[in-house]
Image (cartoon, grey):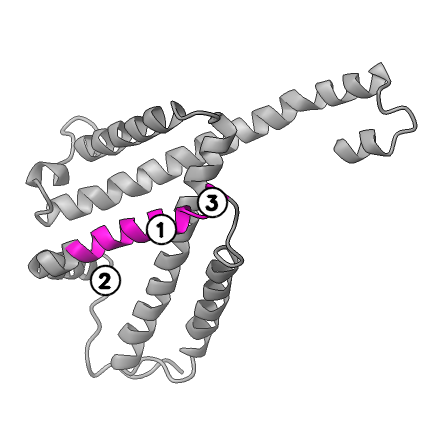
Amino acid sequence: MRRCIATSKRPNHPRNYRKSAHRIPKFTLGATISAFASALGTANAGSRILFSMGRDGFIDDRLGGASRRTGSPALSVAVVMILTFIVVLVWSRAPGINGASLFGYLGTIGVFLILVAYILTNIGAIRFFVTRRLWTWQWIIPVLAILVLGYTLYSNIFPIPVAPYNIFPYVALAWLGVGLLIVFVSPALVRRIGLHLEENEGLHVEEHAGPVP
């Protein structure tokens, strides 16, 4: 749209503005749908994780309870949605913040954490399958994935971006620090979560099982 106007011989012609104005609602609708889908997906994932952790004794057992009427983790969903609403409400009051910038800021922080989660997932997969001698050469695939993810993470941090994007890696790092603190303070909780996940996802493998060809 900008290139169309910039290369036009008469960029200030009213017809160009009419064309641009005609396209703006479509872009806005697409961005709104994308933002809503992103919010819904992250709220669903966050509440499911909180539900699983609550079931294993994190903070309060009631977080691991489900609604008798719908069977959904209603309390976990409510907690995640309330916390999200508070963060968005408080941050939206900052000077110079609008909906688009706020979505971009939160999305940037989320991407840092997702990249770290993917890296740790691949490391966990290598440890899980290699120690059980289920992989021979297959470990190469997650190693390559770690390299790609690591480069993506690095390229989003260096060179140091302009403010306020330069502080977002530290925000993500602080959130990871909270997770590490929970791991060190309550290792029994972490073991329960791991065992429960192993049982629910069928990750238990007999030690005598042979390697994957």
Please determine whether, in this image, residue 40 is positioned above or below residue 196: above
Q: Is residue 42 left or right of residue 156?
A: left
Q: Residue at x 71, y 18 (%)?
A: 21
Residue 175 magenta: yes
Q: Which residues are magenta?
A: 163-181
Please determine whether, in this image, residue 127 is positioned above or below residue 191: below
Circle 3 residue: 165
Q: Are marks 2 and 3 in contact (CB under 8 Å)?
A: no
Q: Residue at x 52, y 46 (%)?
A: 162
> How crowded is the residue under tag 1: few (<14 C-alpha within 10 Å), some, or many (20+)?
few
As helix, strand or loop, the secondary structure at mark 3 comes to loop
Residue lying farthest to the right in this orientation: 9
* Quadrant that contains the N terminus: top right
Circle 2 residue: 202
Give the CA distance from mark 1 to mark 3: 10 Å
Residue 14 magenta: no
